[in-house]
Amino acid sequence: MKVLVIGAGNMGLTYAQGMSKSKLLKKKNIMVLDKSDEKLEEVDQISYFDAYSELHECVPQADIIFIAVKPYHAEPLFKKISSLVTSDQIVISIMAGITIKTIKSLLGLQKIVRAMPNLPAKVGEGVTSYVASSKVSRLEMIVVESLLDTTGKSIQVNNENLIDASTGISGSGPAYVFYFMQSMMEAAQQMGFTRNESKVLVSQTFTGAVELFNQSDLSPNSWMEKVASKGGTTRAALDSMEDNNVNELIKDAAFAAFNKAIELGKNY
């Protein structure tokens, strides 16, 4: 089996490197295509990848085509490869907003998987939600899931609406966490900690809190109640967040990303 990754950006290379560890693929069975000379030089440095700059040289060889380009590149890209693909090939797209229906229409293929990864895939801690067209067989789905799992965990969802929703939660979610971390680090430095001390305090606090959450069945609210005692420091912080409507603002942000994903899809 051979996999072609189109787009050697952050997520494209992340998945290529993750899939290179899969027992389903042998060395040199991952092809990476990009138009950037700089990116191709980077790919060339990785011995177990074959780098390509021309579609006709690699698309016909692939069993699975992994599309990792920006959504606005979708239409021109698919027009170029529509004459090169075959009905047996599976296309996995991680483009935000581009629907299975659109991909089918532009490519003329029926075996389509739409997925939404997130940035922690770079360190093997990502989560990818995905949904497939009806023509992808059960056995093929096992292969797809195995490949997606090479960068963390994957979740099969029931409909495409949940892929757009995943964009607002897990896809864009790391940025929300970084936003919160940045704010806490700035507060720590204003209190007198050095930048490095602030980084350690904040990053370890997040790591520890996530580990506590993962190792128990308690909800976030239950953990907050455990940390916050009446009249204490944590309760003062949580009351401040409630007074400033932080809970609703975070949900508004998630829905803004969700709605933007839907809007992107309507453009194609």
Image (cartoon, rainbow, N blue to C red):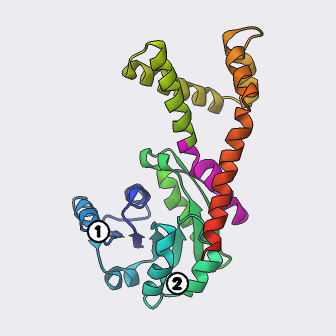
Q: How many marks?
A: 2
Residue 154 included in the magenta stretch of the image: yes
Q: Which residues are magenta?
A: 153-175
Measured from the top left, where is residue 71 in percent x and y? 51, 69
Foreground mark, 2 or 1, reads 1
Q: Residue at x 70, y 39 (%)?
A: 249
Measured from the top left, where is residue 157 in percent x and y? 69, 60
Q: Amino acid at mark 2?
A: Asp
In-image side of 114 versus 10 (left or right):
right
In-image side of 75 versus 228 (left or right):
left
Q: Can residue 65 be seen? A: yes
SS class, disc 2: loop
Depicted 178 relative to depicted 232: above or below? below
Secondary structure mostly seen in the magenta stretch: helix
Q: Amino acid at mark 1?
A: Ser
Q: Quadrant of residue 37?
A: bottom left
Query: What residue sits right under mark 1 in the picture?
Result: 36
Q: Residue at x 52, y 84 (%)?
A: 88
Of the image marks 2 and 1, the number of the one nearer the N terminus: 1
Mark-to-mark CA distance, 2 and 1: 29 Å
Residue 37 included in the magenta stretch of the image: no
Depicted 154 relative to depicted 123: above or below? below
For label 2, count other residues whose C-alpha is less than 10 Å away and answer few (under 14), some (14-19) or many (20+).
few
Q: Residue at x 38, y 22 (%)?
A: 195
Identify the mark at residue 88; answer none if there is no mark.
2
SS class, disc 1: loop
Residue toward you, 180 or 112: 180
Q: Residue furthest top?
A: 231
Q: Residue furthest bottom?
A: 83
